[in-house]
Amino acid sequence: MKKNTIIDNLRKEIENFSTEVKVEKVGKVVEVFDGIAKVSGLFDIKASEMVNFAGGEVGVTLNLEEDSVGIIILSDFSKIKEGDEVRATGKILEVPVSDAQIGRVLNALGEPIDGKGAIKTDKSYPVEKVAPGVITRKSVDQPVQTGIKAIDAIIPIGRGQRELIIGDRQTGKTAIAIDAILNQKGQNMICVYVSIGQKDSKLRKLQARLEEGGAMDYTIIVSAGASEPSPLAYIAPYTGVSIAEYFMDQGKDVLIIYDDLSKHAVAYREISLLLRRPPGREAYPGDVFYLHSRLLERACRRNADYGGGSITALPIIETQAGDISAYIPTNVISITDGQIFLETDLFYKGIRPAVNVGFSVSRVGSSAQIKAMKKVAGTLKLDLAQFRELEAFAQFGSDLDDATKRQLERGKRAVEVLKQPQYSPVIVEHQVAVLYALVKGYMDDIAIDKIKEFESGLVEYTERAVPAFFKEVKEKGMYTEESEEAFKKSLADFKTGFKN
Amino acid sequence: MATLKNNDIAYALHEATVGKTGKELDVVLNNAAKFLTRHRLIGKRLNLILDKLHNIQNKDAGVIEVKISSKNKLSHTSLNEIESFLKKYYRGETIHTEEEIDDSLIGGVKIQIGDDIIDLTLQNQLEQLQKYLLKS
């Protein structure tokens, strides 16, 4: 571009410009500490209103007191000093939303932090919004296929459901979430992964993993890292769900993962204590339940009149020494529509994903399960529960009757079938075939250490011998009687050829 | 016991003192001082209460307190213009103007009325231009 053209263009732009004169509400910083500012004046300010500090820093009002306002600072607060001017903007905190955010890593304010350049947006959504009302909703009736056999068969998740993933540290909570994202390829789903208070290295690894699996084509990552101030960790999940709502409003299905809400509660506790709000149980403020309920209530399935989109939420909670009766875990368990409980003992026994089937439940998902899965997995949960009971009992003696022995053997094989390595989601039609073989007893005489081999061989064989079975399950959600017969025959054929 | 709010105390003081003079006022003020001491309100909160009382009295009397900052001293005509605009905008009867010469300004004026600021400085206009150019 020539020098003159630049000047001409600038001149043209400046000619169109006119300054705006307006009355602004201004307060003064009285004190500032740990990401919090107390500001005098600003008497007409609203709750959750954005304010601008003299150096361009952004803040949000959280405490409206008689003589001052408590503000959480969402940027670097080290340059703010006593006596600085604070300008009210008249706007409730908003984040930019756009289709171009897909595949990007954003901070808690919706700005890109992955170094891939600015995102052009012309729309923004408020961070705090009232959850959709009953009239706009529809009951959950479509499944989210996580690709994890233990979940899709026993604790199914539906689109619009809130299913908690709970467990101690290092039990594979994030792994389940990542597998679920990886399996959404081609499932018509947008994924939002909200990382709260995690190390940047962990996030980077996760991003690389998603890129490798081609999952970043439909995923947005919102991050408030461990090194960032707690106000950002507090805002991040709301930012994530606002972006999710933008896609839901277009009639799309969205899967949002909050990793994790324990750290979110801790960040909110920090802010509340700094704002001198009275502490309650475990020093959390009185409204910590509302903190999570208003967030998770925004997950929903809309009916056709309101666009038909959905937000499925998978919040994660980290427990201490398996204590699910602590304050935050019980709160979130009561808010969500079920939980997937992961156990350290199972994890170290080699049962991975370490899902404790007895403590895990899905309160609405079963109505969203496809027919074929419902048919084959119907008795699986009960079988497993009985197996656990018998297993403990059988340790005392070896004189067991045949029925009990059979049940024990079946249980052992069920546990083996439900084991699954990380990053290897299984598509639903393959799950149906394997579980069919299990519950109909085709695996009863296969050695335990050969189960995995049998499983993969069976899928391969069926793919060649009865492709119609897979096709029907995939397209119609159920197999016909003819294809079931054909599958049974191929199953028997495969078994005779299988070297035990 | 419910907490005493600064605003309520200031209103009560205003109500009690308005229209009173001489001995009558002395008695009221004496009682007010006793009340404030009894409730331990003499100290940091007293300034806040008195500020509020001052604002209430101004509002009642239709007085607007304005602080005008500029680089150079303003001419009488400009001052009169600003004052007459403010009288209309804030529906006040009298205006108490405090002028301030601020060397940090490049040009223009900054008008402050309580919490409100009308920023007509050159710096603010340049900032707005910067934002506009970055946007377009």
Image: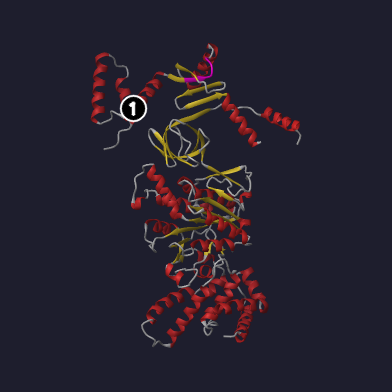
Q: Where is residue A10 in the image (x, y as percent from the top left)?
A: 70, 31
Label 1 crowd bin: few (<14), some (14–19), many (20+), radius 10 Å: many
Q: Give the range drawn in magenta.
A: B67-73
Q: Nearer the viewer, residue A179 or A366?
A: A179
User: Which residue is rendered at x = 26% and y = 31% of the image?
Assistant: B40
Q: Is residue B72 magenta?
A: yes
Look at the image and tell me whether residue A301 can be seen: no
Q: Position of residue A224 (x, y in %)?
A: 51, 49
Which quarter of the image is occupied by the C terminus of chain A?
bottom right
Q: Mark 1 lies on which chain?
A: B
Q: Indicate the quadrant where residue A435 lies.
A: bottom right
Q: Does the magenta stretch include residue A492?
A: no
Q: What element carries label 1?
A: helix
Which quarter of the image is occupied by the N terminus of chain A?
top right
Q: In this view, does A184 lie above or below A377?
A: above
- Disc 1 marks a residue whose amino acid type is Ile
To which residue does mark 1 refer? B49
Left or right: residue A2 compared with residue A311:
right
